[in-house]
Amino acid sequence: MKAILSVLFFLTFYTQDTFSLQLSNAALSLTKDHVVYDGSYRQIPYPNGDVPKNIGVCTDVVIRAYRKLGIDLQKEVHEDMKANFSKYPKTWGLKSTDTNIDHRRVPNLQVFFTRKGTSLPVTKNADDYKPGDLVTWMLTPSLPHIGIVVNRKSADGKRYMIVHNIGRGQELEDCLFNYNISGHYRYNPTK
């Protein structure tokens, strides 16, 4: 029995570690694309819809990184919101879901990652943030932001860097503690 538990623990750790590295690499690959910050509302196909490749916001970094791994957050978020609409924020005054925008809103992703992934403690310890983790911040009291922790270290080697889009396109930046962290998540739907 002990041997079986050890194998299961190893497979769970290996699967998470492999997935996290793949998500990190997917996010890093996005930094090669020229993207102009544009958060305007757009009608997009469903499922697997995306805004044009040359535009986007912070949530589009997360959506595109997961999509590179075959995971459609547009569909996943929509299905959970449709079944559990009352659990999601009502900030925008919607009475029902909207497949064009729901997955592109940080507060909705926070609820989704809490419900379907793992919500981790928010700390000031850089060692707690691992490649493949998702971090949300409040840039101002009303401006949420999201990024992906990647497997590249800061110049001083003390923390992992972030791939995000804060207005300058999809970029790699040492900014984990530059803003007020509001959430810390892991989401691996393959395990």
Image (tube, rainbow, N blue to C red):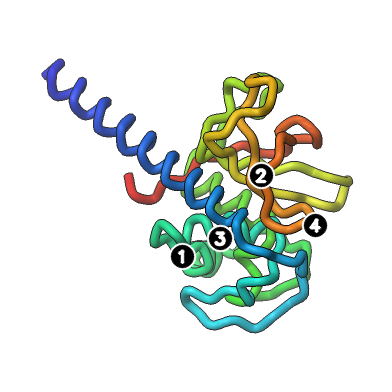
Q: Amino acid at mark 2?
A: Leu
Task: Give how far across and how far down residue 164 sits, in percent.
Answer: 67, 49
Position of the C terminus by quadrant: top left
- Where residue 12 sits, quadrant-wise, is top left
Task: Give how far across and how far down residue 165 sits, in percent.
Answer: 71, 54
Query: Do the residues bearing badges 3 and 4 touch, measured as CB atoms within 8 Å?
Result: no
Position of the N terminus by quadrant: top left
Question: In the displayed structure, would residue 168 be above or below residue 131?
Answer: below
Tell me the CA gap for discs 3 and 4. 17 Å
Query: Do the residues bearing badges 3 and 1 touch, measured as CB atoms within 8 Å?
Result: no
Q: Which residue is mark 1?
A: 72
Q: Which residue is mark 2?
A: 172
Question: In the displayed structure, would residue 91 be above or below residue 54?
Answer: above
Residue 7 placement, left or right of 63: left
Camera-side residue of 96 and 4: 4
Can residue 97 be seen here? no
Q: Amino acid at mark 3?
A: Ile
Q: Which residue is mark 4?
A: 167
Q: Which residue is mark 3?
A: 63
